[in-house]
Image (cartoon, rainbow, N blue to C red):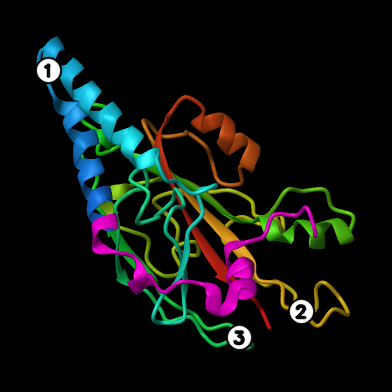
Amino acid sequence: MSDRPLSAARLAEQLGPLLPELGSIPPEAFELVIQTRALVEAVVLTDVDAPARAAAARAISAITDDLLARHRPEPLLLVRRDERGVESLLQAGSGRLNPQAPPVEWLERRIEPDPGTGPVPSTVRARCVFGAAHAGSPSRVHGGVLALVLDDPDARPILASRGIKASSFLHWIAADIDPSTGGLPANASVDAHAFVQGKNGGGKIGYRGPQPPADFPPNTGKRLIHIYRLTLYALSSPTGLADGFSLDELRAAIRGKVLGEARLNISYSND
């Protein structure tokens, strides 16, 4: 067995029919997450006296003990969606059974193509309503500005084969995005005027699309499915960066300003 961690898509491929269907998850599991988020909101907003807080803490402790009476060995639960997709229900970015994940509601989610299908442009739309538990600075809407990083950690062995030492391939970094616009339109990187962009892994400013080689690892006859990470940061104030910044410069600029972050993992292969 290799010590290299398996991606969700690769693990799902190996599990095959053993992977449970999304419909097998009882509705009570999703209701528990909803009520847990409501509890966190109540803890943030409550102004009850000390005895009431102590009583609530004891009740929550008892519930915690009950839930831990049976638990998974690790925080991983993959299910197969009806439209041939694979969903990780416990991941921190948008896992529907993880109450710490933002409450993402998918509005438009493309059916995943059959293996071997060529690249097809697609649009994914979702919305997320934040509450008091995610509040930003006064007079700001949950931080006021956003920054994003899109990278491919599965490109590491490919980069290593070319003599490049890097933990991932960087496809896009952008900062000082106004969240009140409601999202970024198609080709936002090309027509970017309202936010700044850094250099991608190819050394150019802006977005670089995924192009994982179909023949790697060579001579194995196996597909290498890449898991791309889209990380979004809510910031308390603008970074002040100019176009052409590096990932290290972005990390330095957002240090101490991150009010929250969310991550979306996207699987893709080029064969």
Q: State the extent of the magenta-drawn residues as a range.
A: 1-29
Q: Secondary structure at mark 2?
A: loop
**Residue 211, placed above or below residue 163:** below
Give the class, few, some or many, for how many residues have Cα within 10 Å of label 1's Cα (few <14, many ≥20).
Answer: few
Residue 73's disc number: none
The residue singled out by tag 1 in the image is 52
Q: Nearer the viewer, residue 19 or 7?
A: 19
Mark 3 and mark 2 lie on one chain; the one further toward the N terminus is 3
Residue 208 seen anywhere in this rendered image of the structure: no
Q: Secondary structure at mark 1?
A: helix
Residue 206 located within the stretch drawn in magenta: no
Residue 157: image location, x then y, percent: 80, 59
The amino acid at mark 3 is Pro
Relative to residue 251, is residue 68 drawn left or right? left
The residue singled out by tag 3 in the image is 115
Q: Nearer the viewer, residue 97 or 123?
A: 97
The amino acid at mark 2 is Lys
Image quarter in which the N terminus is found: bottom right
The amino acid at mark 1 is Ala
Residue 90: image location, x then y, percent: 44, 53
Residue at the far front: name it: 69
Q: Secondary structure at mark 3?
A: loop
Between marks 1 and 2, how big is the CA–CA gap? 59 Å
Residue 2 seen anywhere in this rendered image of the structure: yes
Mark 1 and mark 2 lie on one chain; the one further toward the N terminus is 1
Give the class, few, some or many, for how many residues have Cα within 10 Å of label 2's Cα (few <14, many ≥20).
Answer: few
Q: Nearer the viewer, residue 48 or 66?
A: 66
